[in-house]
Image: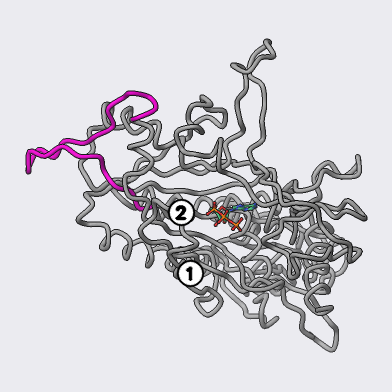
Amino acid sequence: MSDIRDKMESLISLCKRRGFIFQGSEIYGGLAGTWDYGPYGTALKNNIKALWWKRFVTDRDDMYGMDAAILMNPRTWEATGHASGFSDPLVECKKCHHRFRQDQLADPERCPDCGGSFGEVKQFNMMFKTQVGATEDAASISYLRPETAQGMFVNFKNLMDSRHPTLPFGMAQIGKAFRNEIAPRDFLFRSREFEQMEIEYFIDPKDWEKAFEHFRQEVHAFNGDIGLGRDHVHELEVPDADRAFYSKRTIDFEFDFPFGRKELYGLAYRTDYDLARHSEYSKVDLSYFDEAEKRRFVPHVIEPSFGVDRSLLAVLSTAYTEDEMGGEKRVFMKLAPSVAPVKAAVFPLLKNKPELVAKAREIYAMLKKALGAVEFDDNGNIGKRYRRQDEIGTPWCVTVDFDTVEKGAGVTVRDRDTGKQERVGEAELVARLSGTIS
Ligand code: ATP
Protein backbone atom coordinates (compact mmCIF):
# COMPACT_ATOMS: atom_id res chain seq x y z
CA MET A 1 0.00 0.00 0.00
CA SER A 2 2.68 2.50 0.97
CA ASP A 3 4.59 1.74 -2.23
CA ILE A 4 1.52 2.67 -4.20
CA ARG A 5 1.04 5.84 -2.20
CA ASP A 6 4.72 6.68 -2.60
CA LYS A 7 4.55 6.22 -6.36
CA MET A 8 1.43 8.41 -6.64
CA GLU A 9 2.96 11.04 -4.36
CA SER A 10 6.23 11.05 -6.31
CA LEU A 11 4.29 11.37 -9.57
CA ILE A 12 2.06 14.18 -8.29
CA SER A 13 5.05 16.04 -6.90
CA LEU A 14 7.01 15.67 -10.15
CA CYS A 15 3.97 16.94 -12.06
CA LYS A 16 3.88 20.01 -9.87
CA ARG A 17 7.65 20.62 -9.72
CA ARG A 18 8.08 20.45 -13.47
CA GLY A 19 4.92 22.27 -14.49
CA PHE A 20 2.72 19.45 -15.75
CA ILE A 21 -0.28 19.61 -13.41
CA PHE A 22 -1.24 21.77 -10.44
CA GLN A 23 -4.03 21.52 -7.92
CA GLY A 24 -6.94 23.71 -9.14
CA SER A 25 -7.08 27.20 -7.51
CA GLU A 26 -4.16 26.22 -5.29
CA ILE A 27 -3.44 29.69 -3.83
CA TYR A 28 -6.94 29.70 -2.35
CA GLY A 29 -6.52 26.29 -0.78
CA GLY A 30 -7.69 24.45 -3.91
CA LEU A 31 -11.08 23.30 -5.11
CA ALA A 32 -11.67 19.57 -4.68
CA GLY A 33 -11.91 17.60 -7.89
CA THR A 34 -10.26 20.21 -10.13
CA TRP A 35 -6.78 20.23 -11.65
CA ASP A 36 -4.97 22.87 -13.69
CA TYR A 37 -2.63 21.86 -16.48
CA GLY A 38 0.67 23.73 -16.67
CA PRO A 39 2.85 24.16 -19.77
CA TYR A 40 4.12 20.56 -20.09
CA GLY A 41 0.81 19.02 -19.02
CA THR A 42 -1.02 21.10 -21.61
CA ALA A 43 1.44 20.03 -24.31
CA LEU A 44 1.12 16.37 -23.32
CA LYS A 45 -2.67 16.60 -23.27
CA ASN A 46 -2.78 18.35 -26.64
CA ASN A 47 -0.53 15.64 -28.11
CA ILE A 48 -2.87 12.91 -26.83
CA LYS A 49 -5.92 14.71 -28.21
CA ALA A 50 -4.20 15.33 -31.56
CA LEU A 51 -3.32 11.62 -31.91
CA TRP A 52 -6.91 10.69 -31.13
CA TRP A 53 -8.29 13.21 -33.61
CA LYS A 54 -5.89 11.99 -36.27
CA ARG A 55 -6.74 8.30 -35.82
CA PHE A 56 -10.48 8.74 -35.45
CA VAL A 57 -11.27 11.78 -37.59
CA THR A 58 -8.70 13.01 -40.11
CA ASP A 59 -7.35 9.59 -41.13
CA ARG A 60 -10.88 8.37 -41.93
CA ASP A 61 -13.50 9.43 -44.42
CA ASP A 62 -16.56 8.33 -42.44
CA MET A 63 -16.16 10.59 -39.41
CA TYR A 64 -17.39 14.14 -38.80
CA GLY A 65 -15.77 16.36 -36.16
CA MET A 66 -18.00 18.37 -33.82
CA ASP A 67 -17.62 20.96 -31.09
CA ALA A 68 -21.00 21.42 -29.39
CA ALA A 69 -21.90 23.80 -26.54
CA ILE A 70 -21.42 22.71 -22.93
CA LEU A 71 -24.73 24.27 -21.91
CA MET A 72 -27.66 22.52 -23.51
CA ASN A 73 -31.40 22.90 -23.44
CA PRO A 74 -32.43 21.09 -20.21
CA ARG A 75 -34.97 19.00 -22.15
CA THR A 76 -31.89 17.14 -23.45
CA TRP A 77 -31.30 15.68 -20.00
CA GLU A 78 -34.94 14.78 -19.53
CA ALA A 79 -34.84 12.87 -22.80
CA THR A 80 -31.68 10.96 -21.88
CA GLY A 81 -32.83 10.17 -18.36
CA HIS A 82 -29.94 12.06 -16.73
CA ALA A 83 -32.27 14.54 -14.99
CA SER A 84 -34.00 11.77 -13.08
CA GLY A 85 -31.44 8.97 -13.03
CA PHE A 86 -27.83 10.20 -13.28
CA SER A 87 -27.07 9.62 -9.65
CA ASP A 88 -24.75 7.77 -7.31
CA PRO A 89 -25.69 6.34 -3.90
CA LEU A 90 -24.58 8.75 -1.18
CA VAL A 91 -24.13 7.86 2.49
CA GLU A 92 -23.21 10.13 5.37
CA CYS A 93 -21.48 8.98 8.54
CA LYS A 94 -23.65 9.75 11.60
CA LYS A 95 -20.57 10.42 13.73
CA CYS A 96 -18.04 12.41 11.63
CA HIS A 97 -20.47 13.48 8.88
CA HIS A 98 -18.05 12.55 6.10
CA ARG A 99 -19.81 11.56 2.90
CA PHE A 100 -19.04 8.60 0.65
CA ARG A 101 -20.19 6.85 -2.49
CA GLN A 102 -21.71 3.74 -1.01
CA ASP A 103 -20.89 1.46 -3.95
CA GLN A 104 -17.20 2.27 -3.58
CA LEU A 105 -16.84 1.39 0.10
CA ALA A 106 -15.04 -1.81 1.09
CA ASP A 107 -17.45 -2.09 4.03
CA PRO A 108 -20.76 -0.38 3.19
CA GLU A 109 -21.84 -0.49 6.87
CA ARG A 110 -18.87 1.27 8.51
CA CYS A 111 -17.31 4.70 7.95
CA PRO A 112 -13.70 4.17 6.76
CA ASP A 113 -12.63 7.40 8.53
CA CYS A 114 -14.03 6.86 12.06
CA GLY A 115 -15.82 3.50 12.10
CA GLY A 116 -19.20 5.17 12.67
CA SER A 117 -22.44 3.95 11.13
CA PHE A 118 -24.22 5.51 8.18
CA GLY A 119 -27.58 7.17 7.77
CA GLU A 120 -29.89 6.08 4.98
CA VAL A 121 -28.66 5.87 1.38
CA LYS A 122 -29.65 8.84 -0.76
CA GLN A 123 -29.51 9.09 -4.54
CA PHE A 124 -27.31 12.06 -5.39
CA ASN A 125 -27.65 13.56 -8.88
CA MET A 126 -24.22 14.32 -10.25
CA MET A 127 -25.12 17.03 -12.74
CA PHE A 128 -24.00 20.57 -11.92
CA LYS A 129 -27.01 22.83 -11.98
CA THR A 130 -26.67 26.37 -13.23
CA GLN A 131 -28.87 29.21 -14.25
CA VAL A 132 -29.03 30.65 -17.72
CA GLY A 133 -29.94 34.33 -18.09
CA ALA A 134 -30.99 36.93 -15.53
CA THR A 135 -34.22 35.42 -14.23
CA GLU A 136 -34.11 33.00 -11.34
CA ASP A 137 -36.96 30.62 -12.01
CA ALA A 138 -37.35 26.97 -12.83
CA ALA A 139 -37.34 27.72 -16.56
CA SER A 140 -33.83 29.21 -16.38
CA ILE A 141 -32.20 26.08 -14.92
CA SER A 142 -29.68 24.30 -17.06
CA TYR A 143 -26.79 21.91 -16.43
CA LEU A 144 -23.13 21.63 -17.27
CA ARG A 145 -23.09 18.59 -19.53
CA PRO A 146 -22.05 15.37 -17.74
CA GLU A 147 -20.90 13.84 -21.06
CA THR A 148 -20.08 15.17 -24.51
CA ALA A 149 -22.17 12.51 -26.29
CA GLN A 150 -25.48 14.35 -26.28
CA GLY A 151 -24.02 17.36 -28.11
CA MET A 152 -23.64 15.00 -31.06
CA PHE A 153 -27.02 13.25 -30.91
CA VAL A 154 -28.90 16.56 -30.86
CA ASN A 155 -27.00 17.57 -34.01
CA PHE A 156 -27.73 14.39 -35.91
CA LYS A 157 -30.28 16.10 -38.15
CA ASN A 158 -28.04 19.12 -38.75
CA LEU A 159 -25.29 16.81 -39.88
CA MET A 160 -27.63 14.85 -42.13
CA ASP A 161 -29.00 18.03 -43.71
CA SER A 162 -25.63 19.72 -44.20
CA ARG A 163 -23.37 16.81 -45.18
CA HIS A 164 -25.75 14.04 -46.36
CA PRO A 165 -23.63 11.15 -45.08
CA THR A 166 -24.59 7.55 -45.73
CA LEU A 167 -24.45 4.85 -43.09
CA PRO A 168 -22.20 3.86 -41.47
CA PHE A 169 -20.71 7.17 -40.31
CA GLY A 170 -19.71 8.76 -37.06
CA MET A 171 -19.59 12.04 -35.19
CA ALA A 172 -16.57 12.72 -32.98
CA GLN A 173 -15.98 15.31 -30.34
CA ILE A 174 -13.44 16.29 -27.70
CA GLY A 175 -14.60 18.51 -24.87
CA LYS A 176 -15.20 19.18 -21.21
CA ALA A 177 -17.67 17.27 -19.09
CA PHE A 178 -18.67 17.92 -15.49
CA ARG A 179 -19.81 15.56 -12.76
CA ASN A 180 -20.35 16.49 -9.16
CA GLU A 181 -18.58 13.35 -7.95
CA ILE A 182 -19.26 12.52 -4.32
CA ALA A 183 -15.65 11.59 -3.69
CA PRO A 184 -13.12 12.88 -6.25
CA ARG A 185 -9.90 10.93 -5.80
CA ASP A 186 -6.76 9.37 -7.21
CA PHE A 187 -5.32 12.51 -8.80
CA LEU A 188 -6.77 12.97 -12.30
CA PHE A 189 -8.69 9.70 -12.20
CA ARG A 190 -11.91 10.96 -10.69
CA SER A 191 -12.39 14.68 -10.93
CA ARG A 192 -15.40 16.96 -11.17
CA GLU A 193 -14.28 18.71 -14.35
CA PHE A 194 -12.63 16.59 -17.00
CA GLU A 195 -12.41 16.06 -20.73
CA GLN A 196 -13.82 13.32 -22.90
CA MET A 197 -13.14 12.17 -26.45
CA GLU A 198 -16.28 10.49 -27.73
CA ILE A 199 -17.61 8.98 -30.93
CA GLU A 200 -21.18 8.21 -31.88
CA TYR A 201 -20.92 5.79 -34.77
CA PHE A 202 -24.26 5.36 -36.55
CA ILE A 203 -25.04 2.02 -38.14
CA ASP A 204 -27.72 -0.21 -39.58
CA PRO A 205 -28.54 -2.50 -36.61
CA LYS A 206 -27.66 -5.59 -38.63
CA ASP A 207 -24.02 -4.39 -38.71
CA TRP A 208 -23.55 -3.76 -35.00
CA GLU A 209 -21.22 -6.66 -34.28
CA LYS A 210 -18.81 -5.73 -37.06
CA ALA A 211 -18.67 -2.08 -35.97
CA PHE A 212 -18.28 -3.04 -32.31
CA GLU A 213 -15.35 -5.31 -33.12
CA HIS A 214 -13.76 -2.64 -35.31
CA PHE A 215 -13.80 -0.09 -32.49
CA ARG A 216 -12.65 -2.65 -29.95
CA GLN A 217 -9.49 -3.02 -32.00
CA GLU A 218 -9.18 0.69 -32.65
CA VAL A 219 -9.21 1.38 -28.90
CA HIS A 220 -6.15 -0.86 -28.52
CA ALA A 221 -4.51 0.74 -31.55
CA PHE A 222 -5.00 4.18 -30.01
CA ASN A 223 -3.46 2.98 -26.75
CA GLY A 224 -0.45 1.96 -28.84
CA ASP A 225 -0.34 5.47 -30.39
CA ILE A 226 0.06 7.06 -26.96
CA GLY A 227 2.51 4.46 -25.67
CA LEU A 228 0.31 2.36 -23.35
CA GLY A 229 1.45 -1.25 -23.27
CA ARG A 230 -1.15 -3.85 -24.28
CA ASP A 231 -0.27 -5.87 -21.15
CA HIS A 232 -1.67 -3.16 -18.89
CA VAL A 233 -5.03 -2.85 -20.62
CA HIS A 234 -7.75 -5.38 -19.81
CA GLU A 235 -11.17 -5.83 -21.30
CA LEU A 236 -14.06 -6.30 -18.94
CA GLU A 237 -17.24 -7.61 -20.50
CA VAL A 238 -19.89 -5.75 -18.49
CA PRO A 239 -22.51 -8.28 -17.31
CA ASP A 240 -26.21 -7.80 -18.11
CA ALA A 241 -27.06 -6.72 -14.58
CA ASP A 242 -24.51 -3.87 -14.56
CA ARG A 243 -25.21 -2.54 -18.05
CA ALA A 244 -27.48 0.37 -18.87
CA PHE A 245 -30.86 -1.18 -19.81
CA TYR A 246 -30.67 0.08 -23.41
CA SER A 247 -27.16 -1.26 -24.03
CA LYS A 248 -26.86 -4.67 -25.69
CA ARG A 249 -23.13 -4.95 -25.09
CA THR A 250 -20.56 -2.93 -23.16
CA ILE A 251 -16.85 -3.44 -22.66
CA ASP A 252 -14.88 -1.46 -20.10
CA PHE A 253 -11.22 -1.09 -20.94
CA GLU A 254 -9.45 -1.21 -17.64
CA PHE A 255 -5.92 -0.09 -16.94
CA ASP A 256 -3.41 -1.08 -14.26
CA PHE A 257 -3.17 2.26 -12.49
CA PRO A 258 -0.82 2.43 -9.48
CA PHE A 259 -3.92 2.33 -7.23
CA GLY A 260 -5.45 -0.68 -8.94
CA ARG A 261 -7.15 -1.90 -12.07
CA LYS A 262 -9.74 0.72 -12.98
CA GLU A 263 -11.84 1.89 -15.93
CA LEU A 264 -9.92 3.81 -18.57
CA TYR A 265 -12.44 3.83 -21.44
CA GLY A 266 -15.79 2.35 -22.37
CA LEU A 267 -17.25 0.90 -25.55
CA ALA A 268 -21.01 0.46 -25.74
CA TYR A 269 -23.64 -0.63 -28.21
CA ARG A 270 -26.39 1.83 -27.29
CA THR A 271 -28.98 0.60 -29.81
CA ASP A 272 -31.28 3.43 -31.04
CA TYR A 273 -31.99 4.62 -27.50
CA ASP A 274 -30.56 8.15 -27.78
CA LEU A 275 -31.91 9.13 -31.18
CA ALA A 276 -35.30 7.59 -30.43
CA ARG A 277 -35.60 9.45 -27.12
CA HIS A 278 -34.50 12.79 -28.62
CA SER A 279 -36.97 12.26 -31.41
CA GLU A 280 -39.74 11.60 -28.91
CA TYR A 281 -38.92 14.61 -26.70
CA SER A 282 -38.12 17.13 -29.47
CA LYS A 283 -40.79 15.91 -31.91
CA VAL A 284 -38.13 16.09 -34.62
CA ASP A 285 -37.77 13.13 -36.95
CA LEU A 286 -34.31 11.62 -36.46
CA SER A 287 -34.67 8.66 -38.77
CA TYR A 288 -32.56 7.73 -41.76
CA PHE A 289 -33.67 6.72 -45.22
CA ASP A 290 -31.67 4.00 -46.89
CA GLU A 291 -31.86 4.85 -50.60
CA ALA A 292 -30.59 1.49 -51.79
CA GLU A 293 -33.04 -0.57 -49.78
CA LYS A 294 -35.84 2.05 -49.74
CA ARG A 295 -36.11 1.60 -46.00
CA ARG A 296 -36.53 4.15 -43.21
CA PHE A 297 -35.25 3.48 -39.68
CA VAL A 298 -33.61 5.09 -36.66
CA PRO A 299 -29.89 4.31 -36.82
CA HIS A 300 -28.27 2.39 -33.99
CA VAL A 301 -25.09 3.54 -32.32
CA ILE A 302 -21.72 2.20 -31.22
CA GLU A 303 -20.11 4.55 -28.74
CA PRO A 304 -16.41 4.45 -27.84
CA SER A 305 -15.86 6.86 -24.96
CA PHE A 306 -12.39 7.95 -23.87
CA GLY A 307 -11.37 10.07 -20.88
CA VAL A 308 -8.60 12.51 -21.77
CA ASP A 309 -7.42 12.94 -18.20
CA ARG A 310 -7.50 9.21 -17.48
CA SER A 311 -5.44 8.64 -20.66
CA LEU A 312 -2.98 11.21 -19.42
CA LEU A 313 -2.80 9.61 -15.98
CA ALA A 314 -2.26 6.19 -17.57
CA VAL A 315 0.50 7.64 -19.76
CA LEU A 316 2.18 9.45 -16.86
CA SER A 317 1.98 6.56 -14.42
CA THR A 318 3.40 4.11 -16.96
CA ALA A 319 6.16 6.51 -17.90
CA TYR A 320 7.28 7.32 -14.37
CA THR A 321 10.54 5.43 -13.85
CA GLU A 322 13.24 5.44 -11.22
CA ASP A 323 16.64 3.94 -11.97
CA GLU A 324 20.33 4.53 -11.41
CA MET A 325 22.60 6.18 -13.90
CA GLY A 326 26.32 6.79 -13.43
CA GLY A 327 26.00 5.71 -9.78
CA GLU A 328 23.24 8.23 -9.09
CA LYS A 329 19.53 7.74 -8.60
CA ARG A 330 17.48 9.36 -11.29
CA VAL A 331 13.80 9.82 -12.10
CA PHE A 332 12.72 9.92 -15.69
CA MET A 333 9.55 9.90 -17.73
CA LYS A 334 9.68 7.16 -20.31
CA LEU A 335 7.11 8.88 -22.53
CA ALA A 336 6.52 7.73 -26.08
CA PRO A 337 8.12 10.36 -28.36
CA SER A 338 4.69 10.85 -29.99
CA VAL A 339 3.25 12.32 -26.76
CA ALA A 340 6.37 13.83 -25.15
CA PRO A 341 5.82 17.57 -24.53
CA VAL A 342 9.37 18.34 -25.66
CA LYS A 343 10.83 16.26 -28.48
CA ALA A 344 14.43 17.38 -28.22
CA ALA A 345 16.58 19.77 -26.18
CA VAL A 346 19.68 21.48 -27.53
CA PHE A 347 22.63 22.44 -25.34
CA PRO A 348 25.96 24.15 -25.91
CA LEU A 349 28.47 22.12 -23.86
CA LEU A 350 29.64 25.32 -22.12
CA LYS A 351 27.70 28.51 -21.64
CA ASN A 352 30.67 30.88 -21.71
CA LYS A 353 32.00 29.88 -25.16
CA PRO A 354 30.27 32.12 -27.71
CA GLU A 355 31.15 29.85 -30.65
CA LEU A 356 29.43 26.87 -28.98
CA VAL A 357 26.38 28.93 -28.03
CA ALA A 358 26.06 30.37 -31.55
CA LYS A 359 26.27 26.91 -33.16
CA ALA A 360 23.81 25.47 -30.63
CA ARG A 361 21.38 28.32 -31.39
CA GLU A 362 21.67 27.52 -35.09
CA ILE A 363 20.93 23.81 -34.52
CA TYR A 364 18.10 24.72 -32.17
CA ALA A 365 16.48 26.93 -34.85
CA MET A 366 16.81 24.14 -37.42
CA LEU A 367 15.25 21.51 -35.12
CA LYS A 368 12.52 23.85 -33.91
CA LYS A 369 11.45 24.47 -37.47
CA ALA A 370 11.29 20.75 -38.17
CA LEU A 371 9.97 19.36 -34.88
CA GLY A 372 8.22 22.27 -33.17
CA ALA A 373 8.55 21.36 -29.52
CA VAL A 374 12.27 21.84 -28.98
CA GLU A 375 13.99 23.59 -26.05
CA PHE A 376 17.30 25.40 -25.75
CA ASP A 377 19.08 25.20 -22.40
CA ASP A 378 22.43 26.55 -21.30
CA ASN A 379 21.73 26.76 -17.57
CA GLY A 380 23.90 24.98 -15.01
CA ASN A 381 26.07 22.02 -15.83
CA ILE A 382 25.22 19.48 -18.46
CA GLY A 383 24.30 16.80 -15.89
CA LYS A 384 21.63 19.06 -14.43
CA ARG A 385 20.24 19.82 -17.89
CA TYR A 386 19.99 16.10 -18.63
CA ARG A 387 18.17 15.46 -15.37
CA ARG A 388 15.65 18.20 -16.06
CA GLN A 389 14.92 16.86 -19.55
CA ASP A 390 14.73 13.30 -18.19
CA GLU A 391 12.07 14.38 -15.73
CA ILE A 392 9.89 15.92 -18.40
CA GLY A 393 10.42 12.94 -20.70
CA THR A 394 12.36 14.55 -23.55
CA PRO A 395 13.53 11.64 -25.72
CA TRP A 396 16.65 13.32 -27.13
CA CYS A 397 19.26 15.77 -25.84
CA VAL A 398 21.50 17.25 -28.52
CA THR A 399 24.82 18.74 -27.42
CA VAL A 400 27.12 21.01 -29.38
CA ASP A 401 30.76 20.60 -28.28
CA PHE A 402 34.19 21.61 -29.51
CA ASP A 403 34.35 18.84 -32.11
CA THR A 404 31.10 20.19 -33.61
CA VAL A 405 32.54 23.63 -34.26
CA GLU A 406 36.21 22.85 -34.75
CA LYS A 407 36.05 19.62 -36.76
CA GLY A 408 32.54 19.70 -38.21
CA ALA A 409 32.07 16.36 -36.44
CA GLY A 410 28.33 16.67 -35.89
CA VAL A 411 26.59 16.78 -32.51
CA THR A 412 26.09 14.24 -29.74
CA VAL A 413 22.59 12.82 -29.34
CA ARG A 414 21.79 11.33 -25.95
CA ASP A 415 19.07 8.73 -25.59
CA ARG A 416 16.86 9.43 -22.53
CA ASP A 417 16.26 5.78 -21.62
CA THR A 418 19.79 4.40 -21.88
CA GLY A 419 21.83 7.58 -21.41
CA LYS A 420 23.96 6.47 -24.36
CA GLN A 421 25.41 9.15 -26.62
CA GLU A 422 26.02 8.92 -30.28
CA ARG A 423 27.53 11.35 -32.77
CA VAL A 424 25.20 12.36 -35.56
CA GLY A 425 26.11 14.53 -38.55
CA GLU A 426 24.31 17.88 -38.70
CA ALA A 427 22.83 17.04 -42.09
CA GLU A 428 21.24 13.82 -40.80
CA LEU A 429 19.94 15.21 -37.51
CA VAL A 430 16.42 16.28 -38.56
CA ALA A 431 15.68 13.05 -40.42
CA ARG A 432 17.12 10.98 -37.61
CA LEU A 433 15.01 12.59 -34.87
CA SER A 434 11.78 13.10 -36.80
CA GLY A 435 11.84 9.46 -37.85
CA THR A 436 11.53 8.40 -34.21
CA ILE A 437 8.81 10.84 -33.23
CA SER A 438 5.83 10.38 -35.50
P1 ATP B 1 -16.80 5.48 -13.40
O1 ATP B 1 -17.53 4.16 -13.28
O2 ATP B 1 -15.31 5.37 -13.18
O3 ATP B 1 -17.45 6.60 -12.64
P2 ATP B 1 -18.29 5.85 -15.76
O4 ATP B 1 -18.55 4.45 -16.16
O5 ATP B 1 -19.33 6.66 -15.08
O6 ATP B 1 -16.93 5.92 -14.93
P3 ATP B 1 -18.58 6.89 -18.37
O7 ATP B 1 -19.87 7.54 -18.06
O8 ATP B 1 -18.57 5.64 -19.18
O9 ATP B 1 -17.78 6.65 -17.03
O10 ATP B 1 -17.61 8.00 -19.00
C1 ATP B 1 -16.76 7.74 -20.09
C2 ATP B 1 -15.30 8.02 -19.74
O11 ATP B 1 -15.15 9.33 -19.18
C3 ATP B 1 -14.72 7.10 -18.68
O12 ATP B 1 -14.30 5.88 -19.26
C4 ATP B 1 -13.57 7.91 -18.15
O13 ATP B 1 -12.44 7.80 -19.01
C5 ATP B 1 -14.10 9.33 -18.23
N1 ATP B 1 -14.60 9.77 -16.91
C6 ATP B 1 -15.82 9.53 -16.39
N2 ATP B 1 -15.95 10.09 -15.18
C7 ATP B 1 -14.77 10.72 -14.92
C8 ATP B 1 -14.29 11.50 -13.83
N3 ATP B 1 -15.04 11.77 -12.77
N4 ATP B 1 -13.03 12.00 -13.91
C9 ATP B 1 -12.26 11.75 -14.99
N5 ATP B 1 -12.67 11.02 -16.04
C10 ATP B 1 -13.91 10.51 -16.03
Residue 146 visible (yes or no): yes
The percent coordinates of residue 187 (x first, y second) are: 75, 59
Residue 9 location, quadrant: bottom right
Left or right of residue 88: residue 54: left
Left or right of residue 400: residue 45: left
Q: Are marks 1 and 2 in contact (CB under 8 Å)?
A: no
Magenta extent: 280-302
Q: Nearer the viewer, residue 427 or 407?
A: 427
Q: Nearer the viewer, residue 78 or 21?
A: 78
* Residue in the picture at 27% in, 57% down: 208
* Residue in the picture at 21% in, 49% down: 204
In the image, residue 150 sits, relative to residue 135, either above or below, namely below
Tag 2's secondary structure? Answer: loop
* Residue in the picture at 67% in, 26% down: 130
The percent coordinates of residue 193 (x first, y second) are: 67, 44
The percent coordinates of residue 41 (x first, y second) are: 69, 53
Instruction: Work out whether mark 1 precedes mark 2 in sequence or the reverse, and give the earlier one.
Output: 1
Q: Is residue 86 magenta?
A: no
Q: Is residue 286 magenta?
A: yes
**Residue highlighted by disc 1:** 224
Tag 1's secondary structure? Answer: helix
Left or right of residue 289: residue 317: right
**Residue highlighted by disc 2:** 244
Q: Nearer the viewer, residue 43 or 182?
A: 182
Which quadrant of the render holds ligand 1? bottom right
The amino acid marked with disc number 1 is Gly
